[in-house]
Amino acid sequence: MSKHVVIVGGGIGGITTAYHLRRLKPDLKITLVSDRPNFVFTPALPHLAMGWRKLEDITVALAPLLPRFNIEFKNEKAEALDPDNNKVKLASGEELSYDYLVIATGPKLVFGAKGQEENSSSICTPDHALKTQEKLQKLFEKPGPVVTGAIPGVSCFGPAYEFTLMLHYELKKRRIRYKVPMTFITSEPYIGHLGLGGVGPSRRYLEDLFAERNVNWIADVEVVAVEPDRVIYKDAQGKEHEIEAVFTMFMPRFQGPEVVASAGDKVANPANKMLIVNRCFQNPSYPNIYGVGVVTAIPPVEKTRVPTGAPKTGMMIEQMAMAVAHNIVNDIAGSQERYAPRLSAICIADYGEDAGFFFADPVLPPREKVITKHGKWAHWFKTLFEKYFLWKVKSGNILPFFEEKALEWIFRVQPIELCSDCSGSPGSRCP
Ligand SMILES: Cc1cc2nc3c(=O)[nH]c(=O)nc-3n(C[C@H](O)[C@H](O)[C@H](O)COP(=O)(O)OP(=O)(O)OC[C@H]3O[C@@H](n4cnc5c(N)ncnc54)[C@H](O)[C@@H]3O)c2cc1C
């Protein structure tokens, strides 16, 4: 009888894993469970917040799509895992049995500064981005000081920079930039650290961009509270400061969701409830459980005075999905071959009028190659990439041969590597 793979989560991680599995093993039974009816292209949420996209431009309905690829779709929340009995409990009470489970739920968002959830804005979900869009309209009508950035414990810094520089451009277009002093406040030890100890010249690059665009910055501090008209932060000496703001946007901290926590300490990292995985993205205690995407526990690359985490970006997630799909299919076939994702990244930070292009291979140091470029072309490249990724989701063709070849020839990227020993931490190199 055909094995059953249950995937929890319908974001970049879940969908990409489902399509790789379908491609590798056409007779596999695959069920994808997601509490959202749609796939949402998260990298365009800052654009949605800015009013540059409509929600329907960046979403794909999953119920009519997935059955076309013989993937069953359940639009439900997975509430609890029973890893000893290979079962996922859904919100309706239904229990799904699996042979292999892939957890790709993304994060639970933690608004760790006092008043952050009520008084500040976020761009991490479609609802948050739409609420931010409304708040921005008020800012445009009644301009005043803006503060953006990241609270302690954040691992996803890129969108905070992107949003800040997009907002600069939007204010400039509306001819009200001179009425809006802008400040970026971050838990990173320096601008451009990105939770990665910097990437190539990212510190110089982002400091220059902020200086050229008149955005002030304060790094290595803890945002402790957000009030309707001010932000309170603590410096390295423990002294509190406040800064006036009529609009704020802070990236929240990411934690593992309840469904992962429900499985206990062998599955959920006790510190942050993220899914424990080895370098092949398999849970060491329950080898039939795998993780893909932001939900996986990747250790921080270095200790920083104010805690920061390592980001998991789209290309890293696509590589995790590819490795996990190969590992599951090989396990079914009785093969010992296992793969680890390379965890390299191409990231484009869009600033509206232009954009930054970053390539890091691998993302976690030590790196073999870093490329940083900047230009208007990168803005158009990101816009095209969004359409291309949505086409991949709609067509089920998640890694067309031309993409694979382009990555290989231009960037020399091998997305996954044969791994003779999976027992190291995720992101560590295979022996
Ligand atoms: C604002 C923003 C911008 C970003 N921009 C970029 C970028 O430009 N480039 C880049 O490389 N990376 C970017 N990233 C990082 C990364 O690519 C995204 O976070 C990516 O969407 C993560 O994919 P995921 O599948 O791990 O999680 P998600 O996209 O969060 O998807 C998880 C899915 O699982 C569902 N789910 C959650 N819990 C349950 C449950 N219990 N039961 C059922 N379903 C559940 C969710 O509703 C969601 O549909 C960005 C991240 C953010 C937040």
Image (tube, grey):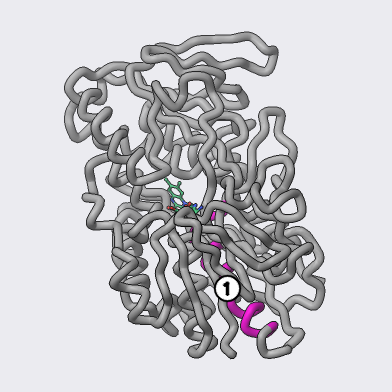
| As drawn, 229 above or below 388 | above
At label 1, counting other C-alpha atoms closer than 10 Å, the crowd grade (few under 14, some 14-19, many 20 or more) is some
Depth check: 155 or 265 in front?
A: 265
**Residue 308 lies in quadrant:** top right
Q: Residue at x 67, y 90 (%)?
A: 333
Write the start and end of the magenta stretch as one range: 312-331
Left or right of residue 204, residue 162 in this image: left
Left or right of residue 285, residue 211 in this image: left
Q: Is residue 177 visible?
A: yes
Residue that carries the numbered disc 1 in the rendered image? 413
Main structural element of the magenta stretch: helix, strand or loop? helix
Q: Residue at x 29, y 64 (%)?
A: 61
**Residue 170 lies in quadrant:** top left
> Does the magenta portion include 288?
no
Q: Is residue 194 visible?
A: no
> Does the magenta portion include 321?
yes
Percent across and percent down for residue 343 are: 61, 63
| As drawn, 258 above or below 247 | below
The secondary element bearing badge 1 is classed as: loop
Percent across and percent down for residue 210 are: 43, 32
